[in-house]
Amino acid sequence: MLIVVVLGLELFLPYSRSLKDKRSVIKSLFERAKSRNNLSIIEADYNDLWQRSRVIISSIASDTGSCDRFIEEMRSFFSSKEGVVVTNFMTHLYQIGE
């Protein structure tokens, strides 16, 4: 059995003063998140707003314990970054196989 984990985060970047600032912060977050985990991550919305971002993260786990650890690690990772406020955090799990 495999479990696909899909996380949706809405971020507020209070110190971002331009789209260039926002891209720099988002790029850094994405690189750090990818270096720690095997995941896919994209900015899915608010591309034209310089203080908001919607991020979608996906990964695959083999058991619910791994899912729970991944979800908590991502929540903690994004919530602990200075200059980033998580305003919404959504979790979707999809079971594949038996």
Image (cartoon, grey):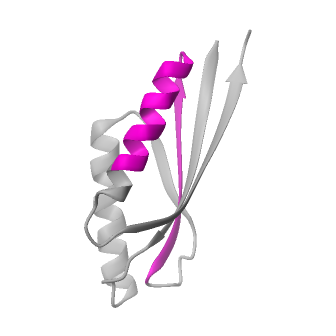
Looking at the picture, how far across and down is residue 63, in whole percent?
54, 16
Residue 24, by quadrant, is bottom left
The residue shown at (51%, 28%) is 67
The residue shown at (36%, 77%) is 22
Task: Locate the N terminus by quadrant.
Answer: top right
- In the image, 47 versus 67, the foreground residue is 67
The residue shown at (49%, 77%) is 52
Q: Residue furthest right?
A: 98
Horizontal relation, residue 18 to residue 59: left or right:
left
Horizontal relation, residue 47 to residue 21: left or right:
right
Residue 37 belongs to the span the image colors magenta? no
Residue 92, by quadrant, is top right
Range shown magenta: 51-76
Looking at the picture, how far across and down is residue 14, in whole percent?
36, 82
Q: Looking at the image, is 76 positioned above or below residue 79?
A: above
Task: Locate the C terminus by quadrant.
Answer: top right
Looking at the picture, how far across and down is residue 17, in whole percent?
33, 90
The residue shown at (33%, 49%) is 77
Count numbered badges in the picture: 0
Q: Looking at the image, is 50 positioned above or below residue 59?
A: below
